[in-house]
Amino acid sequence: MNEDSNNFKDNQSRYRSVTVIGLADTIGSVIAAIFWFYIATLLTPEQYGELFFVLGIAGTASLISLFGTENTLTVYVAKNVKIQATLYFLSLIIGIVSSLIIIIFFYRIDATLVLIGYIINSLAIGSLLGKKQFSSYAKYILIQKILTLVLGLTFYYAFGVDGILYALALSYSFFIIRIYKEFRSSKIDFSLLKSRFGFVTNNYVLRLSGGLIGNLDKLIIAPIMGFAILGNYSLTMQILSIMMMLPHIVFKYTLTHDASGSQNLKIKKITILASIGIVFLGITVLPHIIPILFPKYIDVIDAIRIMSLAVIPYTLTLLFSSKLLGLEKSKFVLIEKITALCIMITGIVVLGPLYGIVGISVAFVLATSVGAVFLGYVIRAQR
């Protein structure tokens, strides 16, 4: 009887945690989506594309800088390894160097400020998830998204398009408090890193390669096909990010539990079924809504029909990655990320000039599908 009672309480606690993460990410994503979608209605595709080109610069630099990735911190903090300060220190030093490079080559101070914001956000979130402080995680996420909306609109109407980037950077500033607390609670100790260098490095490279798909694409599309195509593509990715919100929520929850040896199979199955329903809506419903909300972005209609298909393999990829990362077998996830990145870049360069945004969309679906098949094979071979 006591065992059944404990299992019930444990399951109740798990679903409560998923709910907290889910509500925070859902509400936060909706707030961010409202902001970016509203901005899209105010700007031309060219202006929207140029804005995301600068964000691509900051995003790419943040990936290079974050040696202490969110997933690495989540896994080791969950295992009670006091490595936060060491990874924070290295990431911030690389971030400062990256900021100087951006200023020298692009003359964009706003991009450097967004870069620092991205870094401190990822570092703080990784520690919060690792400590299973899901309520605190929810507060930080919601505050940042609300600040993005409020400051973003205020700065846009006060200073124009460029003001949006400064507002975005400022929305992350309160994460500095969390970074300061972590430095005080743990010491910089490179010996902790030395014995775990393989996992940390693999995780860094896989985060870099995986994240580049969502950032480097912007830096490639703009010079090859122009800011108008990039603007349409960026809006498509904004819509797709909403569709992929559920698997991201579940991944943040399952990673810390997979690292602790808990399977959570029921939640994973529900997530897969839900992703199938999301794909159906993306193919049948969204193409009728987009022309009404975004009449300037007609190319998004065909793109979203195709890219919706990526939701299912993307969900599988995240769930498989959670399992492997929890086992500290990051090399397989690394191979998947590098393979997907190569397919995506090749698709943009080859299919993009021939078929425009449709070619880019096909490349994205292909890259995601290959990654899911590979990780599925790896999981099957591990049994």
Image: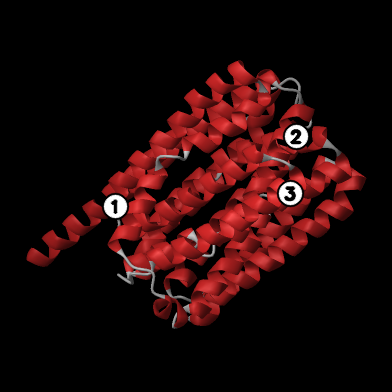
How far apart are the two marked residues, 2 and 1, measured between alpha carbons? 37 Å
Circle 3 residue: 104
Say whether residue 256 is left or right of residue 313.
left
Residue type at numbered disc 1:
Gln
x and y percentages locating residue 284 in the rendered image: 65, 33
Q: Nearer the viewer, mark 1 or mark 3?
A: 3
Tell me the crowding category of disc 1: few under 14, some 14 to 19, or many 20 or more residues within 10 angstroms, Cα based: some
Sequence order check: which comes first, mark 2 or mark 1? 2
Residue 9 image offset from top left, x and y in percent: 17, 56
- Residue where numbered disc 2 is placed: 50
The CA distance from mark 3 to mark 2 is 19 Å
Image position of 185 (left or right of 331): left
The disc placed on residue 133 is 1
Instruction: Find numbered disc 1 in the image and state the secondary structure of the residue it sits on.
Output: loop
> Please, is residue 87 above or below residue 42 in the view?
below
From the viewer's perspective, is 256 left or right of 372?
left
Is residue 1 visible in the rendered structure shown here? no
Task: Say which amino acid is labelled 3.
Answer: Ile
